[in-house]
Amino acid sequence: MAKQESIFILKGTIGGVTFYKSTDGYLAKEKTSLGGERFKSDPRFARSLENWEEFKRSALVGKVFKDAIKPFIKNASDSRVTGRITQLMSRILKEDFVSIRGQRHPANGINSIASKHLLKGFNFNKNAILSSVLKKTFFIDPTSDAINITSLNPTSDIEFPPGASHLKISAGILVIDLATKIFDFQQTNLINIEKTDPPLTGNLTPAIPPNGLGVKMYLLKLEFYQEVNGLLYSFENGGFNAMEIVEVS
């Protein structure tokens, strides 16, 4: 794969070379003559076919996962989060020790201790890692699904980006069954904080606890705002907002 460096931007195929645009810029790659039927039937491509089938499965499950929390991550994710979620599901798929290669599924691997470690700490915005923004320990009550934050000092416990005057903290709890693709996602209340506020204590609790079978994930989100003439405005690209899977059970 080559990168286009020219005053002329090319798209399409010329002389066996395909020119296209990606998130990494304008690229060029050699066109292959390998057809779909040959790829599926030729024994030489058996391993590649197995990998492709498992990649598709990981991507599909990743899409279900992302769609389940789509309203929540809208302004707290980076441009490559979809690919990173697919990669995460591919790693979880490798924890499936009951299926043969090519037929492994994230649903069979997600309950392992290793998979839960992979999920916990996943940040949806690589430009704003939660631990670099929130410098305060919080506690999760599994009985009420509440996230409790005590004695939070905005001045020392939160890394406000330049120009930000306010912060909103919220949480979401997701129960998802990757096999059936059935999920239940519930959001909590908001904690509104001004940069100059004294230390405070708050609880983030869903009005209705999530229901269903599967893995339970707790997501914590921080959104920054700027006050102008008494009104709060969100930062346009959400680049400073942080969101992380903080617990998995």
Image (cartoon, rainbow, N blue to C red):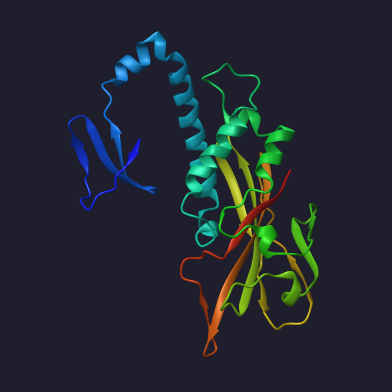
Q: Quadrant of the C terminus?
A: top right
Q: Is residue 98 visible?
A: yes
What residue is at 60 percent from the left and 49 percent from the top? 184
Residue shown at the point (74%, 34%) measured from the top left:
113
**Residue 43 vertical position relative to residue 114 in the rendered view, above or below:** above
* Residue positioned most to the left: 15
Residue 19's x, y, as percent?
25, 40
Picture quarter containing residue 203? Answer: bottom right
- Outermost residue on the front side: it is 6
Instruction: Give coordinates of residue 120: x percent, y percent.
Output: 69, 46
- Report whether residue 64 is seen: no
Q: Residue furthest bottom?
A: 229
Q: How many marks?
A: 0
For the N terminus, which image quadrant? top left
Q: Position of residue 96 (x, y in %)?
A: 63, 25
Horizontally, residue 144 falls left or right of residue 21, namely: right
In the foreground, 188 or 199: 199
For the point 55% across and 89% down, which residue is it? 230
- Above or below, 7 relative to 91: below
| Quadrant position of residue 169 | bottom right
In the rendered structure, the answer to whether residue 248 lies left or right of residue 21 reads right
Residue 36 in the image: above or below residue 128: above
Percent of width and height locating residue 17: 23, 33
